[in-house]
């Protein structure tokens, strides 16, 4: 059994449902310390974070970024095998986290061990940053680590996130940015009353609908570079007492904006609230800034990744800013260029999550080649 397959299996066996790390980071730290890495455990609240670094500050810093937490597996009976007992079937490794992203984390570790063994005097620093709060609230994970790094002047030049980014085969997509995410909980107040006497009540649904229609119909922008246009989507509307003869006194609406670098979260908040005010709503809105967008322009990191993926996949990768969010959104504001390369994402968060064994065994070599391009003269 290959080293990366063995380590991935060991990580899957740890029931690290977010935000519980379940010992994954301690296992990894022990391995890397044997290869000369300096480990620092950063715990915030109930979240474990690991920073393991090799080399010196007299050159660039390359960070490999990942997470050890996984989403809940759902009903055991829905799986063909126990989600926390890794099993190989038909050339694939099955288990919760196999693709998202314990396979990439294991590949990071194997690649790092190989890199420092072959290049003990490499220039700059190479580091591994792991959290157990990527699949959850993402409050006490990389967000807090980035705050700590900012306070102590920690410099990161390049960041490679191992999120499952490939679509059909390993290396067919290079993620060079991500949209920002902004969520809102909107409460519109009215006056409860009997539906037969609307003059004695104020229906918050009727008041809010024109404003919501304007927000959802708006063309926010035409996109930015390779980013799609900004989108506002309503995900939940709730009002009423359950009776069909009562005008509700309150309406709650949840909506989210996925936005490109045309906007900042603060600008979008102001635009949305201007619409709500223009429609004369009595409202309260709570905003949650999940992260600003980031984009890595042409440069050493993007060029090196493109060349490596061309060698591995046999074709130039699609360079994309699609998908949801990742923890790179907290590292990019530190001044780092960020990309994402990982296995095929077809089964992530699903029942019977799996990763191709062949892809898994190719990943350490891919990551190693990228490190050598950036940190070996």
Image (cartoon, rainbow, N blue to C red):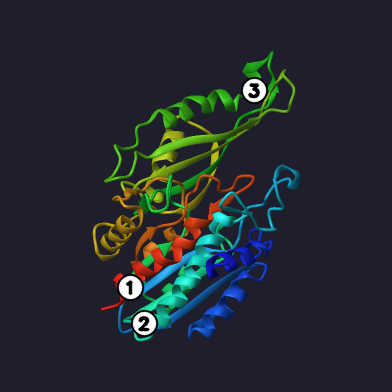
Q: Where 212 falls versus 116 (above or below)?
A: above
- Distance between the Cα atoms at labels 1 and 3? 70 Å
Q: Name the N-terminal-most of marks 3 and 2.
A: 2
Residue 39 screen position, x and y as percent: 52, 81
Rendered residue at 44%/75% (across/down):
127
Circle 3 sits on which residue? Answer: 201
Q: Name the N-terminal-most of marks 1 and 3.
A: 3
Circle 1 sits on which residue? Answer: 372
Q: Name which quarter of the figure residue 334 lies in.
A: bottom left
Q: Looking at the image, do the residues carrying marks 2 and 1 touch, with CB atoms under 8 Å apart?
A: yes
- Distance between the Cα atoms at labels 2 and 1? 9 Å
Circle 2 sits on which residue? Answer: 119
Residue 361 screen position, x and y as percent: 49, 62
Q: Name which quarter of the figure residue 294 lies in.
A: bottom left
Q: Is residue 142 visible?
A: no
- Distance between the Cα atoms at labels 3 and 2? 75 Å
Q: Is residue 237 visible?
A: yes
Residue 179 circle label: none
Rendered residue at 62%/65% (across/down):
11
């Amino acid at each position: 059994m290959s080293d990366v397959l063995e380590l991935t299996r060991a990580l899957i066996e740890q029931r690290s449902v977010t935000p519980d790390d379940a010992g994954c980071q301690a296992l990894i730290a022990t391995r890397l310390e044997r290869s000369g890495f300096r480990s620092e455990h950063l715990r915030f609240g109930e979240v474990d974070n690991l920073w393991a670094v090799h080399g010196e500050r007299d050159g660039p810093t390359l960070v490999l970024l990942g997470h050890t937490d996984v989403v809940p597996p759902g009903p055991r009976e829905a799986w063909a095998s126990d989600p926390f007992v890794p099993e190989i079937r038909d050339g694939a490794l099955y288990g919760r986290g196999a693709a998202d992203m314990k396979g990439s984390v294991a590949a990071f570790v194997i690649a790092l061990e190989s890199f420092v063994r072959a290049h003990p005097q490499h220039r700059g620093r190479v580091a591994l940053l792991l959290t157990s709060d990527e699949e959850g609230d993402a409050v006490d994970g990389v967000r807090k680590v980035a705050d700590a790094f900012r306070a102590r002047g920690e410099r990161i030049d390049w960041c490679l996130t191992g999120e499952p980014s490939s679509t059909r085969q390993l290396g067919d997509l290079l993620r060079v940015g991500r949209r920002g995410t902004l969520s809102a909980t909107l409460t519109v107040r009215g006056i409860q009353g009997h539906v037969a006497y609307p003059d004695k009540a104020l229906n918050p649904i009727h008041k809010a609908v024109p404003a919501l229609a304007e927000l959802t119909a708006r063309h926010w922008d035409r996109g930015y570079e390779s980013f799609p246009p900004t989108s506002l989507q309503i995900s939940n509307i709730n009002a009423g007492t359950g009776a069909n003869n009562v005008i509700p006194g309150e309406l709650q609406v949840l909506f989210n904006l996925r936005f490109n670098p045309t906007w900042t979260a603060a600008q979008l908040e102001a635009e949305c609230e201007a619409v709500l005010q223009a429609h004369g709503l009595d409202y309260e809105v709570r905003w949650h800034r999940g992260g600003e967008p980031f984009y890595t322009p042409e440069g050493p990191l993007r060029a090196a990744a493109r060349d490596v993926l061309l060698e591995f996949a046999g074709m130039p990768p699609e360079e994309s800013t699609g998908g949801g969010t990742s923890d790179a959104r907290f590292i990019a504001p530190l001044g780092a260029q960020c990309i994402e390369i990982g296995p095929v994402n077809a089964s992530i968060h699903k029942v019977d999550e799996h990763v191709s064994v062949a892809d898994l065994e190719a990943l350490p070599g891919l990551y190693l080649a990228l490190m050598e391009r950036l940190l070996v003269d």
